[in-house]
Image: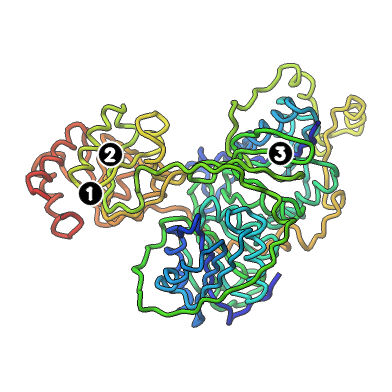
Amino acid sequence: MAYNSIVCIKQVPDTAKITADAMTAEGTVNRAALPAIFNPEDLYALEAALGVKERFGGTVTVLSMGPPKAASILRDSLYRGADRAILITDRRAAGSDTLATGYILAKAIETIGSYDMIFCGRQAIDGDTAQVGPQCAEKLGIPQVTYLEEFLNGEADRVRLRRNHGNGWEVVESTLPVLITVVSTPDAVRPWAARRVMKYKKARIPAEVISPEELESLKAKGLLLEQWTMEDIHADFDRCGLAGSPTKVYRIQSVVLTKEGFSKVEPTEDGINGMIHELITDRTLG
Amino acid sequence: MTKPNRQGEVWVFAEQQDGQLHDVSLELCGRARLLANQLGVTMGVILPGNNVESLASTLIAHGADNVYVVDCPRLAQFTTLPYARAVCALIDKYHPQIVIYGATPLGRDLAPRVASEMRSGMTADCTDLQIENVIDPKTKTEHENLLLQIRPAFGGNIIATIVNYDQWPQMATVREGVMPLLPADANRTGRVIRENVEISEALMAVRVLERHVEQRKVNLKASRIIVAGGGGIGSRENFELIYELAGVLGGVVGASRAAVDSGFIGKEHQIGQTGTTVRPALYVAVGISGAIQHRAGMEESAKIIAVNTDPEAPIFSIAHYGIVGDYADVLPKMIKAIRTRNL
């Protein structure tokens, strides 16, 4: 049997590379100053889906939401083996919290239509919430299995999965369709395939195309990637973007290191003895 | 989607596995008690499971006024859908104003599902919760006594305060170990309320076939004293000195991610954003530069000693005692100083 999988992916600022330059005077993060990367755990989700396709046949569709420049992770996915790539890009989706994002992704998945499995990374490194996967599953009315480590086996109407429950692992069986969030894969994420890079490096979403001629030419070559708006997915505007987000950011502070009561201790016996004495006096020790 | 109910209780979701309550649930009871006092309402705990009613007395001793028990064989093992049904049914019935969950793997699986079904807000992985009057900067409307949901974001580089004006309950998951575990009071009284929630067969879509629990060999969270080594220790053999210092101090050994990734020590020792969050009485950071991800997991320690050869290492900025020097020279001196006092 073959499975049709959808992989939800996100382009994120590389939070590991944050420096003082990336912070604005107001203490918010200047996303433009950071390199944009494929969210690491979403690559595991893609690998898991491609692994399923290899074993059982079927298709892999990647779905993302973001500004037009997120088309680069669509191409990245095609280089690794995805069959189809869709970007939801619409200003009315900006400012969506996890609830609104889960809703929008669910509407897009319903628009895609038939699917057996949806794979998501556990969480994205910019927010670290791990909420969008479960919320998307709820909106679709399908079960969820979080923290996948290995896809074990599949039958026509069910799959067997090994998940990490935080204190070890468990094997679960789920009916289909199911949404799966992924923390790791047994095999390393596959690299770009040279042939696929040659084929898809010119693939574009309409927003990246300047002239109508180019658009026609890309379409003719099958290199025009899908770009969807809120209308395309029949989303209710009240449930998208800021309007559809119950959580509001009230305050942002950049992390300031606290430095109170610091004593420099000389690395000598006297210095260290003095420190130990203080710790005993204030009852930290003893 | 529920409208604000300012008479609503403050709730904690009690996480249990095989009849054992998770520490974080008791930590949350302490904070929920304070929030409820501040709001002048009662505090409730929801306790779904199978044969779990006996846990109610512990929850009452930790601050609960009401414990809502949903006891059902279909809740014997955690799977998302039956647990989400139980929690949503009770929220629908009682309209609490706040519901908090441990930011454990289980809590972070369950809570967003509940929030989506209720169409209410959910903030992940909070490190602090407070009550404050908030003026919406857009509409200038004042909202009395909102829950401030405070959490690190962008890899710990910023602290965001999140609020939920009108799509209640206000809900959040809270990181383990950040709320102090308050002492139990066996004389407290509270009510145990049995709730029947129908868990249909259709909700049993996921079944657990096999479960493997790895025994944690170190209990970082319960330790008063932690001696942690970082990448600067250089090798597994060199960690012996870390163990020796921990031994004379009666503490346990922790590690930074760099040390774990280099294979000097096992992952169960890891402290930081991706490991365990700790708040011991004394934290000795040895050869740890103090990346933000590490500091996030230990900066609440009551006293911090940092030992590092690099005087510019960020760890010194949060340390109470800073020793610039080679740990191979400093640690034996510390061990000697402690041994001579016979602690």
Callout 3: residue from which chain? Answer: A
Q: Element under label 3? A: strand
* Amino acid type, callout 1: Tyr
> Which mark identifies residue B321?
1
Q: Is residue A126 left or right of residue A219?
A: left
Q: Is residue A139 above or below residue B8?
A: above
**Pointer 2 and pointer 1 on the same chain:** yes
* Amino acid identity at mark 2: Val
Foreground disc of the pair 3, 1: 3
Residue farthest top in this picture: A195
Residue B286: assigned label:
2
B238 over A10 or under it: above or below: above
Quarter of the image for the N terminus of chain B: give it: bottom right
Q: Is residue B158 visible?
A: yes
Q: Chain of mark 2?
A: B
User: x%, y% of residue A117?
Assistant: 75, 40
In the image, B206 versus B71, the foreground residue is: B71
